[in-house]
């Protein structure tokens, strides 16, 4: 289960990095008066996911149940922020910003892999042992 979780998390991270690169290349990092994606939202989503990954790796290395649950909580917060970005991406139209050019396949892959990674981390944390 650990390898499947790591693989799923890797797919989500790679798709997310691709989306971030596309967003930045499309001018998403420039300051605009009105934007669907504030910079704090864009930066906190991957920061929480990377922090959760560090907690999960530490939980696997030490066998700490507390770290496993901390990873689950961090990933849940990252997922909520991702859901906010997804709903804003779906509701686009009146603000023609960099997010409007994001590929649907990459967004879908990132979201599905993120949800699967969260479910697997939750199952890992729920297990009697972390391993």
Image: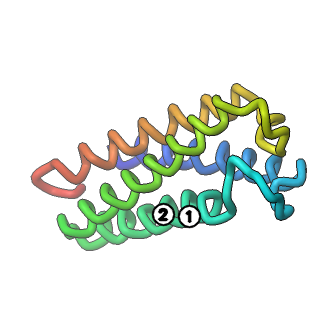
Furthest residue in direction left, as rendered: 128
Picture residue at 38% right of the left edge, 61% below the top = 74
From what the image shows, is residue 91 above or below residue 65? above
Residue 124 percent coordinates (x, y): 25, 49
- Within 10 Å of the Cα at label 2, are there few (<14), some (14-19), or many (20+) other Cα atoms? many
* Residue position for label 1: 44
Question: Which labelled disc corresponds to residue 22?
Answer: none
From what the image shows, is residue 34 above or below residue 51? above
- Closer to the camera, 97 or 105? 97
Q: Secondary structure at mark 1?
A: helix
Residue mark closest to the camera, 2 vs 1: 1
Picture residue at 70% right of the left edge, 26% below the top = 105
Q: What coloring was used for the rendering?
A: rainbow
Quarter-of-image position of residue 66:
bottom left
How much space separates mark 2 and mark 1, taking CA atoms?
Answer: 6 Å
Residue 112 percent coordinates (x, y): 51, 32
Would residue 83 be found to the left or right of residue 64 on screen? right
Residue 64 percent coordinates (x, y): 20, 69
* Rendered-image quadrant of the N terminus: top left
Residue 14 percent coordinates (x, y): 66, 48
- Closer to the camera, 64 or 96? 96
- Closer to the camera, 63 or 89? 89
- Within 10 Å of the Cα at label 1, are there few (<14), some (14-19), or many (20+) other Cα atoms? some
Picture residue at 68% right of the left edge, 51% below the top = 37
Q: Residues at badges 2 and 1 in contact (C-beta under 8 Å)?
A: yes
């Amino acid at each position: 289960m650990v390898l499947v979780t790591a693989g799923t998390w890797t797919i989500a991270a790679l798709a997310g990095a691709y989306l971030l690169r596309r967003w930045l290349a499309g001018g998403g990092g420039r300051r605009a008066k009105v934007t669907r994606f504030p910079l704090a939202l864009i930066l906190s989503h991957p920061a929480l996911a990377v922090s959760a990954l560090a907690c999960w790796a530490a939980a696997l290395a030490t066998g700490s149940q507390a770290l496993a649950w901390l990873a689950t909580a961090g990933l849940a917060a990252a997922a909520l922020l991702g859901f906010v970005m997804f709903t804003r991406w779906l509701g686009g139209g009146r603000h023609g910003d960099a997010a409007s050019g994001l590929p649907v396949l990459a967004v879908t892959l990132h979201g599905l892999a993120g949800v699967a990674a969260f479910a697997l981390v939750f199952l890992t944390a729920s297990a009697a042992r972390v391993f």
